[in-house]
Structure formats: structure tokens, C-alpha cells
């Protein structure tokens, strides 16, 4: 599959680098091999990692964590003329046949021919201990979801602009920001999907575990963030939404 991108759909891959540069290098290599001739679309954003990535597109002056880095990338890449941002953790591993970006973009175009603009779409994963709807369903091609995990979402930048931005000022760590962004998109009439034809594996918290105390701080921040938006029973709310 050879992708033909236009001004209407001009996507870019941004791998968020923090931690092991070797892991980021392997993921970038997989994307480059999967999308021949599209090297300009495969960018690495170094989030002030202690182990710098030498070929990074940009290196941030300080660690802005997941949501802070995403907010920065949305602005920078939107200003550069891209329409869709595939924002990928560096600890994901593609398992499907290539290409990846071209297949995901083609899926978006097919879905939008049905009349519903796609706000966010994610590959499916082999496992997810937090959100059941992210796990691949054999026999399915693509499923609508009420929200998605932010491991590797393809984000429509126009959708984020129309929603008024990321809404993460008090939660740069990002836990829960992905959930709330995709929920807001659904409520505003955008489609949110999991693509079962594109399968990845995720190695959870590879960078987060390396920073002492990070997971507990991020979890406490997520608790306050989602409780303020979905209520004190937000876990039950998400459980019901993921089951639907």
C-alpha cells in the first residue's frame, strides 16, 4: 500500500522519547522500514531524556511528561501544516504487516466516507490491564469506542482545536488526559475508534518505573483530574464505557 497524502490529510508520526535510546531507535527503524520514502513523517521528540536521542527532531529543554509533550507537539506540528498526529510511546512494538501509518490513514478515510469525522483512532493491542476495549478482538476490523488509551493514538488536530485544546494544565503527567480527550471528542460528535487490523504490543511503564515515586504521583494526579471531570466514581464510569 502506497499512501498518497494530501492537504486534507497530512499525517505525521511522533515518537516520544524518554529513557532507553535503543528502544526508541528500534521503533523508529520499524516505522521507517514500514513507510519507505516517508522519513520526513517519522519524528522523534526527545522529552529531555537522561539518555538523549541523537537524531531527535526536537529535544525539549525539560521533561514535560506525556501530556506536556503532547500539548507541545500538537502546537508545533499543527503550525507545520500537519493535520493528524500519531503520538506514540517509545515502548510499543508493531506486530502487524507494514505499512502502519498508511493503513491507519486509509482506515480514517474509509470511516469518514460514512459521514462521521474521526477524532481519534488507535491500533489494537495484545493486552491492556486498564482498558479492555483496547485489546484486539479477533475477527473484527475496526470498532467504535467511547474512549481510548493514549499509548499510540492518531489524533485529528482539528478535533483538538475545536474541543478547545488538550485540557491538561493541572496534569502534565498525562494519566487520564487521553481518556478525557477522547471522551470529549465522542461527546462533541467525533468518531473514536480502535483498529483491530493493526496490532501492537505495549511494554507498560518502562520509563515511569525508572523514576522513583513517579507512578504514585501520577496516579494521585489522575485521581484528582478525572474525579473533577467525571465524579468520584470515575472508575465505575470508565468500566461501563469500556464494556460498551
Image (cartoon, grey):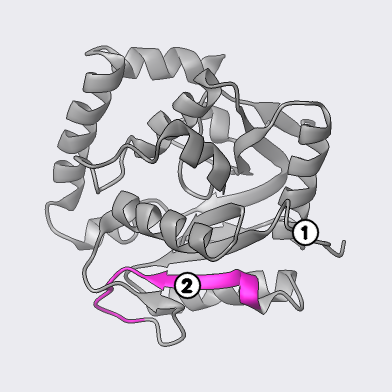
> Could you say whether the residue bearing mark 1 is in a helix, strand or loop?
loop
Q: Is residue 130 visible?
A: no
User: Is residue 236 left or right of 34 when viewed as pictured?
Assistant: left
Q: Say which residue appears at 47% left-offset and 48% top-offset.
A: 151
Judging depth in this view, the residue of 214 and 107 nearest the camera is 107
Estimate how packed mark 1 is, as few (under 14), some (14 to 19) or many (20 or more) residues with alpha carbons within 10 Å.
few
User: In the visual, does 25 lie left or right of 232?
Assistant: right
Mark sitting earlier along the chain (2/1): 1
Q: Quadrant of residue 117?
A: top right
Which quadrant holds the N terminus? bottom right
Furthest-right residue in view? Answer: 1
Residue 105 lies in the magenta-colored region: no
Q: Nearer the viewer, residue 137 or 197?
A: 197
Percent position of residue 118, x then y? 66, 35
Please name the residue that numbered disc 1 is placed on: 6
Residues at marks 2 and 1 touching, judged by CB atoms closer than 8 Å: no
Give me the C-alpha separation between circle 2 and circle 1.
Answer: 23 Å
- Side of 145 where 59 appears, left or right: left
Residue 166 drawn at (x, y percent): 37, 40
Q: Is residue 129 above or below residue 48?
A: above
Circle on res. 230: none
Q: Which residue is mark 2?
A: 44
Find residue 56 and report its horizontal and vertical position in percent: 44, 80
- Residue interval drawn in magenta: 40-52
Binning the other alpha carbons within 10 Å of mark 2 as few (below 14), some (14 to 19) or many (20 upward) gives many
Residue placed furthest toward the bottom: 54
Q: Secondary structure at mark 2?
A: strand
**Viewer-nearest of labels 2 and 1?**
1
Q: Quadrant of the C terminus?
A: top right
Amino acid at each position: 500500500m502506497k499512501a498518497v497524502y494530501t492537504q486534507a490529510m497530512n499525517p505525521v508520526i511522533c515518537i516520544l522519547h524518554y529513557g532507553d535510546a535503543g528502544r526508541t531507535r528500534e521503533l523508529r527503524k520499524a516505522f521507517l522500514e514500514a513507510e519507505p520514502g516517508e522519513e520526513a513523517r517519522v519524528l522523534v521528540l526527545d522529552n529531555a531524556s537522561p539518555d538523549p536521542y541523537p537524531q531527535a527532531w526536537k529535544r525539549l529543554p525539560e521533561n514535560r511528561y506525556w501530556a506536556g509533550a503532547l500539548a507541545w507537539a500538537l502546537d508545533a506540528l499543527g503550525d507545520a501544516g500537519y493535520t493528524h498526529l500519531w503520538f506514540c510511546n517509545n515502548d510499543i512494538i508493531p506486530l502487524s504487516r507494514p505499512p502502519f501509518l498508511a493503513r491507519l490513514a486509509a482506515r480514517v478515510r474509509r470511516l469518514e466516507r460514512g459521514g462521521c469525522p474521526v477524532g481519534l483512532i488507535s491500533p489494537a493491542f495484545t493486552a491492556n490491564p486498564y482498558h479492555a476495549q483496547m485489546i484486539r478482538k479477533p475477527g473484527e476490523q475496526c470498532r467504535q469506542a467511547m474512549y481510548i488509551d493514549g499509548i499510540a493514538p492518531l489524533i485529528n488536530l482539528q478535533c483538538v482545536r475545536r474541543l478547545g485544546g488538550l485540557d491538561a494544565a493541572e496534569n502534565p503527567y498525562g494519566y487520564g488526559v487521553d481518556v478525557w480527550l477522547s471522551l470529549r471528542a465522542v461527546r462533541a460528535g467525533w468518531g473514536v475508534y480502535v483498529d483491530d487490523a493493526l496490532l501492537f504490543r505495549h511494554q507498560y511503564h518502562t520509563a515511569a518505573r525508572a523514576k522513583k515515586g513517579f507512578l504514585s504521583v501520577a496516579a494521585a494526579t489522575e485521581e484528582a483530574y478525572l474525579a473533577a471531570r467525571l465524579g468520584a466514581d470515575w472508575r465505575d464510569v470508565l468500566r461501563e464505557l469500556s464494556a460498551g
